[in-house]
Image: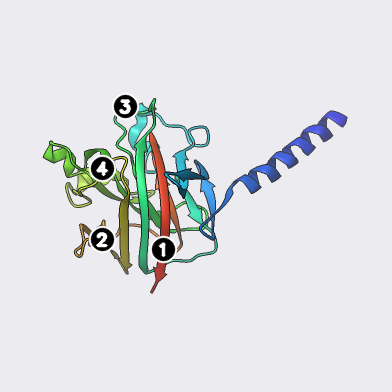
Amino acid sequence: MKTTGFFFLAAFILGIMNSFAQEIVFQNLKFEAKNVTASVVTLKGEHVMKVERDLKALPFDVNRLESTVDEPTYVRLKDIDFQNGVIEVKMLSQIQNPSPFQFAQGFIGVAFRIDGNDSAYESIYLRPKVGRSDNQSFRNRAVQYYAYPDFKFDRLRKEAPGMYETTAPVDLNEWITMRIEVTGEKAYLYINDEKYSTFVVEKMKGKTTHGTVALWVDIGTIGYFKDLKITKQ
């Protein structure tokens, strides 16, 4: 009985600690970590959010690439319900050294319309490593849309080549401004304050119509974020 009581108490305390550890306050906004490690750090004199995929919480298998990437690996905002409007954030991407994935591209972006249990959402992310590649076919994959859980990059690439990916003049180790305008079934992506959109998703394929917003990274990425702004319509 004493042993059982001890383990029960230890589990209870650990649960409390984990619940507190999941919440991060940054720029007067409250976030929850989902399958990532996250913290507020100083980068070149600025306070920024640092996010990396947590391989203990969500393992990665290079032999099952399609089923272990494009997952809910993000810090999600608390107390917001977003349907239509504008999401803008500055992001900087680095590749972990050593990297758990030799083909890591610095995967970094935004997820939105996330449901309450992280089972469905929309996302647009970047592969900054190939944004200025000398290989045009690589460049054409610098931007990626996907809808979790049914329409990840691999399915979209097979069923509609070129429709959900495009090029963008981005790179690792530099601040990139990503602005996503969401209107009904459409999403427009603007990069670095460009007047015209870099990318348009003509009809999003997700199951959700509203939900929260998150800062997203994937395998092998060290992601930094700042200046998140959300305008609902």
Kindly report which numbered mark, 2 or 3, lies closer to the viewer in this rendering: 2
- The reply to whether the C-beta atoms of the residues labelled 1 and 4 are less than 8 Å apart is no
Provide the residue designation for mark 3: 102
Q: Position of residue 82 (x, y in %)?
A: 43, 66
Q: Position of residue 124 (x, y in %)?
A: 32, 52
Query: Which comes before the other along the chain, label 4 or label 3?
Result: 3
Kindly report which numbered mark, 4 or 3, lies closer to the viewer in this rendering: 4
Q: Please, what is the three-letter code of the amino acid marked with disc 3? A: Gln
Provide the residue designation for mark 2: 193
Query: Which one is nearer the viewer's eye here, 217 or 159?
Result: 217
Q: Quadrant of the C terminus?
A: bottom left
Separation of residues labelled 4 and 2 (CA atoms): 16 Å
Query: Which comes before the other along the chain, label 3 or label 1?
Result: 3
The residue sitting at 25% across, 48% down in the picture is 143
Query: Which comes before the other along the chain, label 4 or label 2?
Result: 4
Provide the residue designation for mark 4: 171
Q: Please, what secondary structure does the residue beneath circle 1 have?
A: strand
Provide the residue designation for mark 1: 229
Separation of residues labelled 1 and 4 (CA atoms): 22 Å
